[in-house]
Image (tube, helix red, strand yellow):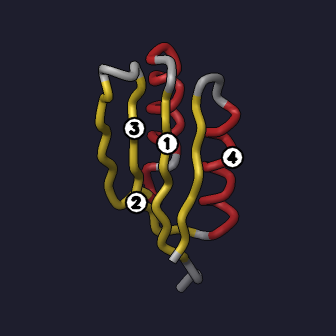
Amino acid sequence: MENTRIAIIGIIVSDLNSAEKVNALLHEYADIIIGRMGIPHRAKGVSIISVAVDGNVNVINALTGKLGMIENVSSKALWR
C-alpha cells in the first residue's frame, strides 16, 4: 500500500471567472479527494472552498501548486 497523507486544501477564488478552471483541476484529482465544501461569500465577492484529500505528498503538493497558479486563486494545504 502506498504511503499517503491526509490534508485539507483551502482555496479562495476572488474572481468567479476562475471557478471553472478550479473545478476542472479538482476533477483531474478526483481520485485523492475525500470531500469538498464550497461557500460563496457574496458580500466580499469571493468563494471559499475546502477540499479534504488523502494522497501522496507529491500529488497533493502538485494540486495545491496548480491551484495557486490559476489567476485570482490562492491555495494552501494543512497537513496531518
Please give left or right for residue 25 compared with residue 61 in the image.
Answer: left
Q: Is residue 32 above or below residue 2?
A: above
Kindly identify the amino acid type of the residue bearing the numbered disc 4: Gly
Residue at the disc numbered 1:
11
For mark 3, give the secondary structure.
Answer: strand
Kindly identify the amino acid type of the residue bearing the numbered disc 3: Ile
Residue at the disc numbered 4:
65
Kindly identify the amino acid type of the residue bearing the numbered disc 1: Ile
Q: Residues within 10 Å of mark 4 (few under 14, many from 20)?
A: some
Residue that appears at 39% across and 38% down: 48
Which mark is nearer the camera, 4 or 1? 1
Q: Is residue 70 above or below residue 35?
A: above
Instruction: Give percent across and percent down for residue 24.
Output: 49, 31
- In the rendered image, the residue lying farthest to the front is 43
For mark 4, give the secondary structure.
Answer: helix
Q: Please state which of residues 66 and 41 is positioned toward the viewer in this rendering.
A: 41
Residue that appears at 42% across and 25% down: 46
Which mark is nearer the camera, 3 or 4? 3
Residue at the disc numbered 3:
48
Residue at the disc numbered 2:
52
Please give left or right for residue 64 compared with residue 39 in the image.
Answer: right
For mark 1, give the secondary structure.
Answer: strand
Q: Is residue 9 above or below residue 23?
A: below
